[in-house]
Image (cartoon, coloured by chain):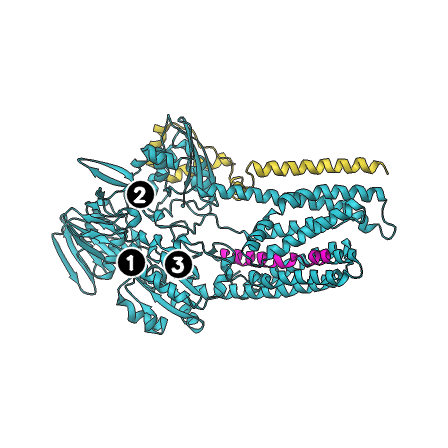
Chain colours: A yellow, B cyan
Amino acid sequence: MEVMYLLIAFSLIIASGFLGAFIWAVRSGQYDDRDTPSRRMLIDDILPEKKNRSAEKKKTDDSGGEGEEQKIHPKKQ
Amino acid sequence: MDFCCQGCATVYSLLSESGLQAYYRLGEETPGISRRKSGRHTRYEFLDEPEMREKLLTFTDGQKSTITLSLPQIHCSACIWLLEHIQHLDPGILRSEVSFNRREATITFDEKQTSLRKVVEVLDRIGYEPDLKIDSTDKRTVSRADRAFYLKLGLAGFAFGNIMLFSLPEYLAGADGIDTQFIHLFGHLNLILALPVLLYSSTVFYRPALLGIRQRQWNMDIAISLGILAMFFRSTYEILTGYGVGYMDSFTMLVFFLLAGKLFQRKTFDRLSFDRDYRSYFPLSILVKKGESEHNIPAIRLQVGDIVVLRHGELLPADARLLSGKARIDYSFVTGESDETGVDKGQVVYAGGRVMGSRVELVVTRPVSQSYLTSLWNRSEFREERDDTLHSLSRRFSRYFAPAIVLIAIGSALYWVPQSPATAINAFTAVLIIACPCALALTTPFTLGWVTGILGRNRFYLKNAEIAEKIAVTDTIVFDKTGTLTFPQEARVRYFGKPFSDQTSSYLASGLRQSTHPVSRSILRYLDHPGDVVPDSFEEVSGRGIAFGIGGKQYRIGNAGFAEGVAPELYASKSDKTRSYVSRDGVCLGFFEISGRYRPGLIQLMERLRRRFTLHLLSGDTPGEKEALKPLFGDESRMHFEKKPEEKLEYVRSLSNQRNVLMIGDGLNDAGALRASTTGIAVTDDTGTFTPSSDAILHTSMLDKLDNFIDFTRYGRRVIKMSFGLSLLYNVIGLSFAVTGTLSPLVCAIIMPISSVTVILFTTMATHLGARNRRII
């Protein structure tokens, strides 16, 4: 039965590891805001397009919003 | 893409220039539609001043600065995305992080490339006008206290789980028991694990218990603390003497459950602010004239004798005397009275007045803190801490419960002393342990937590769970008129059609100003434009509309037959809304839609309320609508008009001396009355904008369900009472074991979770059933 001592020691060490992880998570502020990150992760990582400003500005004025809309969709897929 | 207004089109072109159009594909609502109308010209010049910067910035080292800005306009996921990519609009911004619940953005920026003022201006340009406040230092301390609470809960959970593991072998071993060596080892391990729970996690209960003892008032925490201490020390004694295994499992479980209950009760609506005072309404900075130069200074630094300059739509933060010729002042902010007041040179304008029309100069006669309006906040009602637990059932109950437990414990100890002192101590501690009101203490947090949550889903937000019990005891309801029973002036009008240029707005406003018809007044307020041009001609045709000529063009505003060139398909009008069409030189530009004065469902609501509550009306407005409102309130003697904020406060205070008053109001002028009442509810169309200090915030669209909500809080109280009965039953069973001095740890470890879990299940099911029956879920 001596092996029990070893097992108990192991289980306590592992459990303390989890407790330590929990304390770290709380202290690093992960529990401060439990809502925003859940929303943020649902947003795809869309990077703002880099483009030639002056040329694009002209285009925006001409074609309005619809043209823009179609252009960025393929990028998402 | 179609935009609601010129502003949103500008935002779109600004965003597409920087490659941020993805904004329009995110979120539940189409962004750009809901931009709040901001007719006022906002200037952020004062943000360049070192004093303002120092007060607003949370961190700065001269190169990098961080500021947390409150942005009430945040409303969907797209907002998070846009605000966190804001560095594409201003490369000087290094980092931006949004807290959705609190509606805040924490922005770090490079002082060399940009400035606080520029950052704020960028935000304002894309439609997030920051709500700049100087006294916003309390939020950070709240978050630190929250962290500690999570640590306490986590620690208790950790100890509970592990101690349970070490205790199970003993329970399962049966008659033979387990190896004494292991009993010894497990006992000591349990003791070590339980120690931090006693010293750290349980501190949540000690403090209120000590406070109760100091005030000589029994409370639930005293009973809990006694039970906790009895459990821990008796267990320690048993373990160290080798007499038994102790109750460490029950002890940690109890603390864990109770903390979880507290967490559940703490449903907060972070994005709402329940404690605003006049500072939130008044402008942060004001233009002051010194000699020939004009510059912005913080409004709170205004001194007597300063000359302030106000433009159209700006609010006066201190009492002042008019220096320039004539002015029109709109006091609706203070009184709810919708008509403008004319003021002559030399007369005093009171704080809270909004300047209409052209630019005026005034000399300050009283500082901000002592002005007519703000003196309200110097009254004792605002300085005293309000006791939210005043009507708490649990508080009332524990007044009898806690002393009863102590009496039973002492009684059973006295009974055993002659026969066996050891049994006496056992019985004494056993009573304290088993009577430790775990189930009882869980009842209130869970019931009220559910009630608060369900009401929140119905857009009725309570400041804290205790408010639900205060609402439940209501017997008298006091209503404000403007903005509560009626629509606020500016919300009544909507415009459909071709957008107006600035010049057209100015001409229309100038023409409308000549008319005293209520509809003209409403549209004028909606246009929110100085309108200083004198029309060349003006004619008002009674019952049809007005016609005027300005700038060589003929304008007509009125019903479909009166305005010219109205397309027949526009004729259709909804029942409670009237339309006013606008035409210029025979061409129809569009129409204004004006909704009825009273909120929909109001008549039915008042009828239902009148049967059960005493209703009062308290208005700052003239008694013009007395006859119309009389059937709603029944009795004329309880309808009061032309009440100043101070008088409202006095009225409600004297009323609440004998009765439990629920005050419902919307404006700053109700702030005193809201505070003096038993429970103050602020109604608002947009929970993101300002509401006066209150106990609860109700969205106006839900006002017609008010009686349902009050009903539900009463039902919640009934659930609490029933649940108290249930947990008392468990206590009686447990006590019958305890008084004999034979309380085995196993019995304790079984009764405790069963009672807690059944009580939680009962309150959960009962509240949801009640909510479903009332159709609010």
Image quadrant in which you'd find residue B758:
bottom right
**Which residue is disc 3 drawn over?**
B674
Looking at the rendered image, the quarter that the N terminus of chain B falls into is top left
Dot 1, crowdedness within 10 Å: few (<14), some or many (≥20)? many
Front label number (1 vs 2): 2
Sooner in the amino-acid sequence: mark 3 or mark 2: 2
Which amino acid type is marked by label 1? Thr
Dot 2, crowdedness within 10 Å: few (<14), some or many (≥20)? some
**Which residue is disc 1 drawn over?**
B335
Sooner in the amino-acid sequence: mark 1 or mark 3: 1
Residue B748: x, y in percent? 74, 55
Point out the residue furthest to the left here. Answer: B536
Which amino acid type is marked by label 3? Leu
Left or right, B154 with respect to B333, comes to right
Front label number (3 vs 2): 2
Residue B639 lies within the magenta run:
no
